Every structure is written in structure tokens, then in C-alpha cells.
Amino acid sequence: MSPSPEQKQWLLKDIIVIGWEPPSVERCDLRIRDGLIVEKGVALSEEPEEQILEGQGAWVIPGLVCGHTHLYSALSCGMPMPSEAPISFGDMLDKVWWRLDKALDRESVAVSGLVGGVSALRVGVTTVVDHHASPNAIEQSLLVLDDALADVGLRRVLCYEVTDRGGPDKAAAGLKAHEELLARTVGKDSNGMRAVMIGAHANFTLSDDTLRQCAELAKHAGVGLHIHVAEAMDDAILINENPVRRLDRLGALLPGSILAHCVHTSSEDLQRIHDAGAWVTHQPRSNMNNGVGYAPVPDFSEQTFLGTDGIGADMITELQTAWFQGQEGNVGWGPQQWLGMFHQASRFASQQLGVTLGVLEPGAVADLVWMSPPPGPPLSADNLAAAVIFRFSPHQIRHVMVGGQWKLWEQTPTSVDSLALNQRAEVVSTEIWRRMESF
Ligand SMILES: [Zn+2]
């Protein structure tokens, strides 16, 4: 039985409430009203009309935020691979990712959003920050993606990756896709569920003129840019300029922006990003997958958070990978420093969405993840960071609440028919892959 979506009053009793920064572990109750946490305390009294859920020591963590992803790749697993393996990052884009995004139509954008959204929910993610591309179905693509994520029940920060690689008409269409979503958003109450950024692919596929237009639109809308920066060496080589300084020169290094990857940046570049009030995202699994090198993590400021770059949305595994890669690369960070980076995505998303995320305290929205604790030593504030790296697993997740409603119950989405979605995804994937083979 899954709980009724109409139920808006919950008392979660005898749970272990976990906080990241500062680390906290507290056995208590949480009271939830109309989407918000309204009370936290020990042995709270039950009130009429309230639904009670007994935890018996279940771990409850704040809903997770995936800070940089590409949901359009949600149906890529199993797609036809090139006959010759890619030999560089540019080759990987040409032979794999740019064939996939060109194969997407409006229906596959919707299904990718639903499939990617459900898989995010299943790993405890309640907010996704997405960077979308579908160059043969640009018009209304952000509206379609927004609808799909609303159906799943996720908070989302959306943009379209504007680029010149398809010519001026497609660059203009990419900009217009943002205006469509802004018209749905600006000045209207999105209830903290949706925000818009202006997306740009990367320096090396954008002319000065197009990048300036992206920055102008962002300034006009009062939002940041979301762009890949120095993911591989190509970014600087192909434009023959330092990519961060170029953004600055073009008026595109805006506060609240996301500069994804920043693998090939100097400490001076990173200081410039920090001083501009922009953020860096770190995607260790994607960096390894694309063979682009180690990111300069010790030089990343506190305005850095984790994303997945389209390799699912599993933030627990991404954090664990960041830790292991950091150990191998002698980064010298302790578990709490990594947990800090993990938590920063919530701070960023809170600013974007205008609600308090990432903490389970009165006043915050009720976005939370209910986990079955594995047998083992008691969890404490002192051992929490190490436990997240060595004991936590997305397999422990049972229920996920977004805005006070259970959107995942017993590992099953409550507002999307999984069986029907599976059937739709099988049909759409096969069509995408057939189109990819024709390119
Ligand atoms: Zn990316």
C-alpha cells in the first residue's frame, strides 16, 4: 500500500535524523505540514488528522541534489557504439554523445526525463540540475522535460545547452527554448519546484557572439549560466584562449553560474570563478569515463558541488568515487571535506529554487530519504562522514518524500506507472538507436 498523495500531515516517529554540515545524528521525531517540516523533537505528541509512520531507528537524510546531469542520456545504456572506439574527448563527443542527442525527438525527450527522473528518485535524489540537448527537437524541449519531471515529482533546475555546432538557427532556437520555460516561470509561483538557468555547451562550440547572447539572456532573466568549462584540454586548445578568462572577457562569468568540470584550470582561474560568485561542479566518474584527467580538487573553493554528468544520478556512489579517486590522487582531504562538497549542492539548489533544502529542520521543505540502516556500530556525528563513504548505499533507500509527499514508496514511484513507462521506454529506445545508426 502506498500512502495517499492527499495526505499532507505526517508525524515521522523514532527516526534517526541526519544532517551533513555540521554533521549531526539525532534520534527524534519530525512533524510535517503542507510540504514543510514544522517541528523536530523527542516523543512529539500525536495530533488529530496526522498520519503516523514509525521508524524504529530508520535513517532519514535530506533529499539529495544532483548538481549537474544530462537526463537526455537516460536511454543510452545499450545504444549502438561506434565501430571504432573513440580515441579522444572530441572523438567521444562526435561518435557517441552528439549522435545520441541528434537522435532525440520530443517523445524521447519526455521518456528520457521520466526514466531519468524515476532513477534519480530511486537513489534519493529530490532535485536535479539538468543540462539538456536535443538538437533536432529544440522547440518546447524544456517544457516537455519540465512536465516529465513534474510527473515524477522532482524539483528541477533546467537549461538547454546552446551551441553553434548546428548553425545559427539552432543556436537561436536553443536561446528561445529558455524563453519558453522562463515564460512558464518568471513572476509565477513555481512553489520551489522549478528554476531556470541559461545553458551553454562549452567554449569550444560557441562563438563570442553566441556566448555573449547567452550571457545577455541570463542577465536579463536574473539567472546564472550553466556551461561546461575546461572538461578536457580541447576547450582551451580549440579556442586558443583560457576558457575562464574568455567567459570573463565576454561578460559571461556571472554570479550563480555553474562551470561544470573545470578539470584543466589553474588556481588563478578557480579564484576568478569564486570571486565572480560562480560555482564549480565535480563529476569524478564522468572524468574517469572520458579519460579527461584529474580535477584540481585541492584548489576548488567551497563553492563546489558534485554532479554525475549523466551517469545516472546516484550521489552516494558519486561521493564515494570522489573519495577513492581523491585518495588515489593524494588530494589529502578527510571524509568531512568531501561531505561538505556533497552538501553544497543543496545550498546552490536552495538559492535557485528559493526554498531551504539539505537540512531537516523546522522551516525547511520536507524533502527526505528514508533508509533501512544496515546492522553495525552506532551512527554518530563523529563517524557520520566516514559512514557515508563506507557504509551508506542507495540500496538502503525505501521511501522518498518531496515537498511533504511520498514520491517513492517501498522503492516504487507513486505518481508514475512503472510498468507502462518500461514499455514506453523500450519502444522509444529502439527508435533512438535505429536513428543513431543512420547518422
Ligand atoms: Zn556535462
Image (cartoon, rainbow, N blue to C red):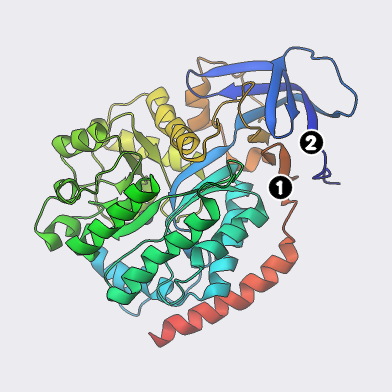
Q: Which residue is mark 1?
A: 411
User: Which three-letter amino acid code belongs to the residue tagged 1?
Assistant: Gln
Based on the displayed image, in which of its 4 quarters is residue 57 positioned?
top right
Above or below: residue 121 compared with residue 385: below
- Place residue 328 in its image quadrant: top left
Give residue 310's position: percent from left, percent from top: 45, 56
Circle count: 2
| Disc 2 secondary structure class | loop
Judged left or right of residue 86, residue 72 is: right
Q: Type of residue at label 2?
A: Lys
Q: From this view, report whether residue 315 is shown above or below residue 81.
A: above
Which of the two marks, 2 or 1, is nearer to us in this view?
2
Of the pair 40 and 332, the residue shown nearer to us: 40
Q: Which mark is residue 12?
A: none
Q: Disc 2 or 1, which lies upstream in sequence?
A: 2
Q: Label 2 belongs to which residue? A: 8
User: Looking at the image, which residue sits at the far left?
Assistant: 240
Q: Is residue 330 visible?
A: no
Question: Who's the residue at 57% across and 38% down the image?
Answer: 393
Residue at position x 34%, y 73% from top? 170
Residue appearing at x 29%, y 53% in the figure? 216
Residue 425 coordinates in the image, percent (x, y): 62, 70
Classify 10 Å Cα crowding around label 1: few (below 14), some (14-19), many (20 and above).
some
Q: Does ligand 1 reach within 8 Å of label 1's beta carbon?
A: no
The kind of secondary structure element at disc 1 is loop
Question: Would you call the spot at circle 2 few (<14 residues within 10 Å), some (14-19), or many (20 or more)?
Answer: some
| Residue 431 image offset from top left, x and y in percent | 55, 81
Who is closer to the viewer here, 223 or 57? 223
Rounded to the nearest whole Å, what is the CA distance between mark 2 and mark 1?
20 Å
Q: Is residue 392 visible?
A: yes
